[in-house]
Image (tube, rainbow, N blue to C red):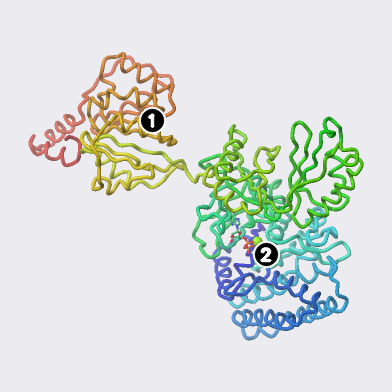
Amino acid sequence: MSHRVYKFGGTSVATAGRIRRIVGLIQADSGAHVQTVVVSALGKAEGEPGVTDTLIRLIDLALDRSDERGTLFQDLRGRHRRVLADLATAEDLPVVLQHLDAIWDDLGELLDGVYLIRECSARLRDTIVSMGERLSVPIVAAAFRAAGTDAVHVDAAPLVRTDDLFGEATVDFAETERLVASHFAEWPARTVAVVTGFVGSTPAGVRTTLGRSGSDYTATILAGALEAERVEIWTDVDGVLSGDPRLIPDAFPLPQISYLEAGEMAYFGAKVLHPRTMRPLQAKHIPLYIKNTLNPDASGTLISDTTGTAAGPVKAVTAIQDTGVLIIEGAGMLGVPGVAARAFGALATEAINVLMISQASSEQSICIVVRADRHAAAKQALETAFADEIRRGDVSGITGSAETAIICAVGERMRDQPGLAGRMFSTLGSAGINVQAIAQGASERNISAVVDAADRVRALQATHAALVRSRRQVHVCLLGVGNVGQHVLGQLARYEPSNGIDLKLVAASTSREMIVDLAGLDPATVRDQPHRPANLDELLRELQDSRLERLVVVDASASDAVTDRYPDILRAGFGLATANKRGNTRPMAFYHQLQALASAGLGGYRYETTVGAALPMIRSLQDLVRTGDRIDRVEGLFSGTLAFLFNQMRAGHSFSEAVFEAHRLGFTE
Ligand code: ADP
Ligand code: ASP
Ligand code: MG
């Protein structure tokens, strides 16, 4: 039996209404596969804080011996009771309540323990913090049963085997796969398994957690173990976006990204996924979909082996906040081997995680980035490790700010694109943001920069605006707004971005007047807007000075004055698309000049003619020649209008009727 694994985050199970919604989504996807639904603790909604955060707060209140603890505990219990009562059937309710009451009793006792001994070990903390998921799964399972779908709740702790690195335990995959496979081996048909996210246990059976946001990881761990056909992670945004939507309002959903891109994004701070989520899927090529519970029709993001066909090489920008920098500097380090190794050794001894390093090529300075809350400890460790060098003056000291952030640009195709790092840093530079260190991942899928914490949001916005493009913007300058030109305007007005290409009209001119707006003109109303006297020289110069990327001049003018300028247009690097035959019916030398410029330039030269009533000829001939055919002879009746007229007359229409009809259909002016 094949498996599908779904994960609903805290936001998706925050209220009874949202839980009903997910029940509907799962019911709609039922079929010949076992449905495993991983859920988080009840999340933030309608003024209520997330349950995991509340559990952490309860621990802090117990440590502080604050009186608030009692009320907060009762509020939390009340919230779960209300959600359950709203969802469960009358006969189910007392059974589930009893199950939850046992957990509340445990939680109360554990918090009393913390209060009494004024200490909460990492191990105890994991047991308490993982209760949110133990409380949510019986409620969600009850909601399924109330809606007529068999469902049982499953505690993942005994199935996900980990080490005892409490707070962010490491999974033992071989053991976990065995445990999960045997648990689901005889799974009853058409019964939804509602599984706790976030939790695991050590070989001795002590509860652990997989780190904040760990339910994502639980879903893919199970999917890997079950060889699931797909995983769906349902959250509260339309997929993985090109940036954090709370900080970058222009961020847009990415239709497709690779496991590696998603991994880089998550590692560098994109909260939407736990950084390890992709790991269990990669080797087994299991596709992962990110979907929005609040907007299920949105197509979401597909994460798989391959990256999608996005517009640019940079897919997204992310940031890790609350980091600190440490710089080991000194002329005496030059060429001394093992300095970096010693620095890492010293930090590893203190269990300080290094987020990023960069080293000046002269080896005169090494820059290390750690979490801000470990900055002081890291500084101390390095000062101790390099005490001798500091005394001798070989190392001038350990410096660096404790208030920084890492800004990161991510994209699979970045390695094919030279100069990106330069663009990122000149963007930050022109936004007045000081870059303290840079690093490029060996995979060349990311470039990171360390900036002041205070500059984080501005740096993200500037980098997103400069490097991440949803689609290619092609700028259009229309020359000639007669019959043909008006059709072009109509097509522009109706144009829906496709194949990753967006068209933006920036200039329009007739022989008498013109209008230019680099920010974009509305093709539907451009003719009613104020124009100034036409001047082709001025227009071309303005367009050239604008440095707009990808500009296409569309000639719908049928004017020799415009044809005269074709060489200039191509030389400027603009694309040229013409609706008339004038450019190609001048002396042969002119034709050859245009062809030579077009093949040397960036924009290309496009023209077409039609025969037999709207059959494009030139493209067809060019394709034949390109694929090896040789043209011996061309013969035919080359007037589409005449061909149409003759056919109409042969069908019995009069000449005048046929001409009116040809005009009505737009075949002739
Ligand atoms: P869940 O409760 O479903 O696990 P999370 O709050 O953990 O949801 O993650 C979803 C949130 O992540 C979004 O609401 C969004 O604010 C945030 N986020 C940050 N960066 C991104 C990104 N690049 N793409 C999508 N969401 C992001
Ligand atoms: N409930 C846990 C957290 O808030 C795990 C998760 O939501 O994925 O971090
Ligand atoms: Mg999450």
At numbered mark 2, what does the secondary structure look like: helix, strand or loop? strand
Asked whether mark 2 lies closer than 8 Å to ligand 2, one says: no
Q: Quadrant of ligand 1?
A: bottom right
* Residue at (39, 18) in percent of width and height: 596
* Pointer 1 local density, CA inside 10 Å: few below 14, some 14–19, many at least 20: many
User: Relative to residue 425, is residue 384 drawn left or right?
Assistant: right
Task: Please tell me whether residue 7 is drawn above or below residue 617 in the rendered image.
Answer: below
Q: Position of residue 39 (x, y in %)?
A: 66, 66
Q: Quadrant of residue 17?
A: bottom right
Q: Which residue is the site of mark 2? A: 38
Q: Amino acid at mark 1?
A: Gly
User: Relative to residue 266, is residue 298 drawn left or right?
Assistant: left
Q: Position of residue 346 (x, y in %)?
A: 87, 47
Q: Which residue is the site of mark 1? A: 575
Of residues 57 and 41, the one nearer the viewer is 57
Q: Nearer the viewer, mark 1 or mark 2?
A: 1
Q: Quadrant of the C terminus?
A: top left
Q: Position of residue 584 (x, y in %)?
A: 28, 21
* Residue at (25, 24) in percent of width and height: 582
* Residue at (39, 45) in percent of width and height: 519
* Pointer 2 local density, CA inside 10 Å: few below 14, some 14–19, many at least 20: many
Q: Amino acid at mark 2?
A: Val
